């Protein structure tokens, strides 16, 4: 059974940093999404299963960075210069199979088959 477990969320002041982790039961391409209070879930970024390619939402570029350690089946989302509007529940998700490339289609929730339970990130002003 596929398991995705996020960790690393918490309370941070504006301008601070957090690193989220998503530990998977196996090797997957991984996407991150977030849902802020009263908002729809939005795409953050995705990283291919082998780490060779990443895709970011335009609004996340420059502040958020994805990486992975495949010896641990873990994906990391480094978030810098956090703003109060980054407050959200952050969830990782994985599609079935091993993809050859990633791009805009990975911003679609419908692509993903497995979801973690989410981790809360709160940025105070």
Image (cartoon, rainbow, N blue to C red):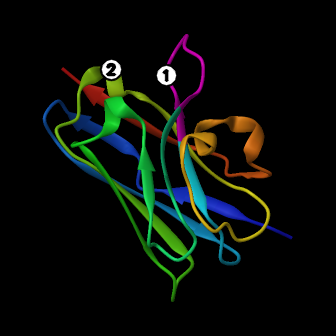
Q: Which residue is at the front of the view, 42 or 91?
A: 42
Q: CA distance from mark 1 to mark 2?
A: 8 Å
Q: Is residue 36 magenta?
A: yes
Q: Earlier in the sequence, mark 1 or mark 2?
A: 1
Characterize the local packing of mark 1: few (<14), some (14-19) or many (20 or more) Cα atoms within 10 angstroms: some
- Secondary structure, mark 1, is loop
**Residue at (23% x, 27% y) in the render:** 83
At 44% across and 72% down in the image, what residue appears? 52
Quadrant placement of the C terminus: top left
| 70 w.r.t. 66: above or below | below
Residue 12 left/right relative to 22: left
**Residue 36, label in figure:** 1
Position in image of residue 58 (x %, y %): 35, 32
| Depth check, front residue: 61 or 5 | 61
Estimate the x, y position of residue 105 in percent, counting from the top left: 63, 41
Please report the bounds of the magenta region as a residue range: 33-42
Question: Horizontally, is 13 left or right of 121 in the view?
Answer: left
Are discs 1 and 2 less than 8 Å apart at CB?
yes
Q: Residue at x 33, y 29 (%)?
A: 59
Which residue lies under the disc numbered 2? 85
Measuring from the top left, give residue 114's x and y in whole percent. 76, 54
- Residue furthest out toward the top: 38
């Amino acid at each position: 059974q596929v398991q995705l477990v996020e960790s690393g969320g918490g309370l941070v002041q504006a301008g601070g940093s957090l690193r989220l982790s998503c530990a998977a039961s196996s090797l997957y391409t991984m996407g991150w999404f977030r849902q802020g209070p009263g908002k729809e879930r939005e795409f953050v970024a995705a990283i291919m299963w082998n780490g060779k390619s990443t895709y970011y939402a335009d609004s996340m570029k420059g502040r958020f960075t994805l990486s992975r350690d495949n010896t641990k089946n873990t994906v990391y989302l480094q978030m810098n210069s956090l703003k109060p509007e980054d407050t959200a529940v952050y969830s990782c998700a994985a599609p079935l199979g091993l993809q050859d490339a990633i791009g805009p289609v990975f911003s679609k929730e419908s692509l993903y088959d497995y979801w973690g339970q989410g981790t809360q990130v709160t940025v105070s002003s």
